Image (cartoon, rainbow, N blue to C red):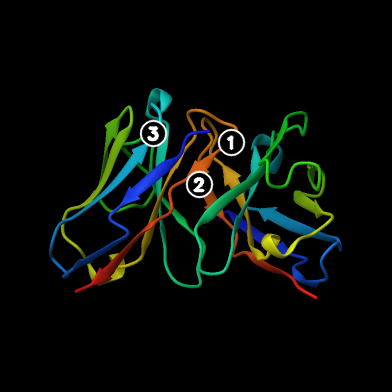
Amino acid sequence: QVQLVESGGGLVKPGGSLRLSCAASGFTFSDYYMSWIRQAPGKGLEWVSYISSSGSTIYYADSVKGRFTISRDNAKNSLYLQMNSLRAEDTAVYYCARVAMVHLHFDYWGQGTLVTVSS
Amino acid sequence: EIVLTQSPATLSLSPGERATLSCGASQSVSSSYLAWYQQKPGLAPRLLIYDASSRATGIPDRFSGSGSGTDFTLTISRLEPEDFAVYYCQQYGSSPPITFGQGTRLEIK
């Protein structure tokens, strides 16, 4: 069965960096676009970034552009999110999600990892 | 950027009743590329509906989606106790950016 397991969250000071990872299993990872979506405490969902199956196409939300970098390693079935210059408003649960084969909706989600940005 | 507005913010109903949740878009969503998700406390969202009206794998047929253009609806025909949750719509017809609605909380009356 499809499994997505995020890791790497934690407490970081404003201006700091963190790298999230998402380990995928149960499907052919290299066939699918992947995405990161976040949810601030008590708030709604916010799309962060997505990456094509080969890694050649990448998009970011304006709120993270220039600070976050999405990447993938198809040999390791893994997705990453490098987060730099973190701000208090980046505090959220970060979900890794598989993009459905045809269109840009999300058919499988990980359990999420909490990132807290605070001094 | 397409802004999605969900209504009502909170819906209070009893098990067995019919629920109608709305999602309005600030501009037309091309090809009806709209999805609905259910989220329960402490859990990740779950895909219910994609392409406005197609049920995702394993989703009961009491869930249905409809609409086009700027007006979309999620209907739950007869509420089961496990259906009380927060529901989000998401558009992918004009992306990036992909956008979500702010959510509708469906609570037990």
Residue A28 appearing in the image: no
Q: Amino acid at mark 2?
A: Asp
Please report, as a chain letter, where disc 2 is located: A
Relative to A36, is A54 above or below? Answer: above
Distance from Cα at disc 2 to Cα at disc 1: 18 Å
Q: Mark 1 and 3 residues: CB-CB less than 8 Å, in contact?
A: no
The answer to which of A47 and B46 lies nearer the viewer is A47
From the viewer's perspective, is the residue at label 3 or at label 2 nearer?
Answer: 3
**Badge 3 is on which residue?**
B51
Relative to B13, is A37 above or below? Answer: above
For residue B8, what is the image quadrant? bottom left
Residue B85 appearing in the image: yes
Nearer-N-terminus badge (1/3): 3
Please report, as a chain letter, where disc 3 is located: B
Please report, as a chain letter, where disc 1 is located: B
**Badge 1 is on which residue?**
B97
In the image, taking residue A95 as reference, residue A81 lies left or right, namely right
What label sits on residue A107 in the rendered view?
Answer: 2
At mark 2, the secondary structure is strand
Please rate how many residues cluster around mark 3, counting C-alpha atoms within 10 Å: few if below 14, some from 14 to 19, many from 20: many
